[in-house]
Image (cartoon, rainbow, N blue to C red):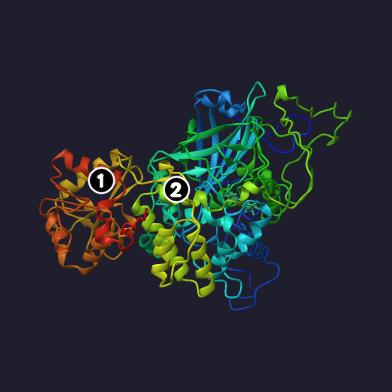
Amino acid sequence: MASSRHNGKNASGPTVAASSAGADQGQSGEFLTTAQGLRLPDTDHSLKAGERGPTLLEDFHLREKITHFDHERIPERVVHARGAAAHGVFESYGTGRSVTKAGFLASKGLQTEVFVRFSTVLGSRGSADTVRDTRGFAVKFYTGEGNFDLVGNNMPVFFIQDGIKFPDIIHAAKPQPDREIPQAQSAHDTFWDFASLHTEATHHVMWNMSDRGIPRSYRTMEGFGVHTFRLVNDAGETSLVKFHWKPAAGVHSLVWEEAQITAGFDPDFHRRDMAEGIEAGAFLEYELGIQVMPDDASDSFEGIDLLDPTKLVPEELAPVQPIGKLTLNRNPANYFAETEQVAFHSGNLVPGIEVTNDPLLQARLFSYLDTQLTRLGGPNFSQLLVNRPHAPVNDMLRDGMHQTAIPTGLAPYQPNSIDGGEPRLATAAEGGYVQVSRPLQATVVRASPASFDDHFSQPAMFYRSLTPLEQAHIVEAFTFELGKCYEQAIKERELQVLANVDSDLCAQVAAGLGLSAPDGNPAVDAGLSPALSQIATEPGPIAGRKIGIIADAGADLAGIGKIRTAAAKIGATALVIAPVGGVLGTGTHTQTVDRTLLTARSVEFDALVVASGTTAASDIKLTLLLQEAFRHCKVLAAWGDGTAVLEAAGIAADGAGVVTGNTAVKSFTDQLAAAVGLHRAWDRAPDVMASAIPPVLTS
Ligand code: HDE
């Protein structure tokens, strides 16, 4: 899509390349220079009075280099500090046209460049990717009508109903202020103190404690706009919608022990996974969909208050209708310039997409612009390459810190005659953003509607719509998190909250904590939404997945080659794990060793396969590797006499989720791919995971 900010006399920025990786402010030329372009003969020694003498103040290169270094850091984001991003393209299906006049959704096949940043909420910039937390899913569409930012999360509901509570929930969830621990975790007293007192958080807390809080990868996460938005079509008709991102790779999560190990073994697990996948051509794909509800002045649908962000609309009541496809296909060239400096704002809207009165959304409209003033050091952050619209900009905003444009013209004000009256104001027909008129007549109050008071029936619906395995994971998560709290009163108060959600859930968590379960008043019929469960019943695509092949000098190297080829064809990667590094074999069939038993950990792999001929079975590290994958319900496989290695590790070759056969037979690799496509061998769960014992259901 063409991009230009240059548009007549009042243009406030230089022409930009279509992508933020464009080099107009990048590094160029062959020689190392100072910031002034002076070529440098030496950057290893400071200028001194003699080889052993003091450093001279006149060393302008030393001072420039150190001064710039001293100021390399900017404040990290107050929330969502830890993130990773990618460039991509959004292709419209044209199906959204009946409900919105937004140009980028208007016709089939229309492509718009995007920049997407995924994040955790709580941790600092250097924290681990796999912690239990909500994930941010922020998308910047560089549309021809200006930037549209859909700044969402991987969960459809939020902790609070009114933006004024945001500092409270964040202060409670961030590390405790005395010792600044724990980092990037909700398993501590202040979080549960707040959650147990502020019961409108219950629904979001249930999602955080579910498998959604520990996604397998960004590729396997759903995304949600959370709030209800108002769409306006060409005829001026309005509807209320919720935005959804549906991942092509399915929705999949880690298991809790795996997430914890990964946080230590590879804190960059999610960002590495995305960057490596994109580099290998296994692009991340999501469908954008909308749930469409009538805008009938009630701001509610089927009894659900659409202005309450702690409520979702079950897909069974309003199906998610696909309107376009997002493909993330290019890694940023520079983390700081792009991922760190990108500035999202829920108020970046285009004609045809408007906000509603959701009090959480209303507060966000203020916050995002405001926070960038501190974080990006002034009001000109929209001139940073990654933030620049790919539509003409003619804004009459002038001066300020870090002004990099050289605006021309004499009259950055309206009306003017000196610059010929330009820039002109656009009518709605010319693409001007004209809000649909919303009649307002009200009394000024600090209060919420009564419909916001139901804090428990949707958490009950969520819990009861999941499979016993997913429910068991929730029980385990609550028991873990509350088990890490010190204050007895907080645990008891949260049990009271759970008693009002579901008695079985409460009873199991109480049992795990060694406390008695209080009586509550849970909803008897909260309804069910089977779409909320994420357990796959059909194999999905395995692009971006990793398969570890265990081998040694005696292994069937030709067979390994076949698996590598088969995996590559479907976008997966097969890595060879051997006792020591180097290359296995000589002659025609050689295989490079990618990991040794020292550098491999099961958490890196979605499946482990033992090559025929491998004899390293006596190594304890190998036994641990296989057993850990087994315990996390991962696919295990072997061909030929590789099964003996599995059996030596205590894994039956005919057990659930164990694929055996012969690599010469195509069905072996097909079966392997199908098993990985189911994500986990959950049938094994009752035998290997303490948490997987199905809860006892009462009538
Ligand atoms: Fe944010 N949020 N938020 N938030 N949020 C920020 O903006 C805020 C909320 C979300 O990758 C900050 O630029 C308030 C809901 C994402 O750069 C800050 C309220 C949802 C990201 C801020 C909310 C989100 C942010 C921090 C309550 C899901 C990361 C730095 C009214 C729909 C964007 C920044 C990125 C970031 C404030 C509530 C999602 C401080 C005051 C609800 C994905 O402005």
The quarter of the displayed image where residue 507 is located: bottom left
Which residue: 43% across, 53% down? 270
**Does any portion of residue 82 appear in the rendered image?**
no
Q: Position of residue 331 (x, y in %)?
A: 48, 45
The label on residue 675 is 1
Tell me the element at label 2. helix
The numbered mark at residue 683 is none
Q: Is residue 412 left or right of residue 238?
A: right
Residue found at x 55% / y 27%: 96
Estimate the x, y position of residue 66 in percent, counting from the top left.
63, 65
Q: Is mark 1 within 8 Å of ligand 1?
A: no
Circle 2 crowding by C-alpha within 10 Å: few under 14, some 14–19, many from 20 = many
> Which residue is situated farthest in the left direction here?
641
Circle 1: residue type:
Ala
Is residue 666 at all visible to an observer of this figure?
Answer: yes
Q: Which residue is mark 2?
A: 218
Q: Please say if 38 is above or below 529.
A: below
Q: Amino acid at mark 2?
A: Tyr
- Mark 1 burial class by Cα count in 10 Å: few <14, some 14-19, many 20+: many
Residue in front for this viewpoint, 650 or 227: 227
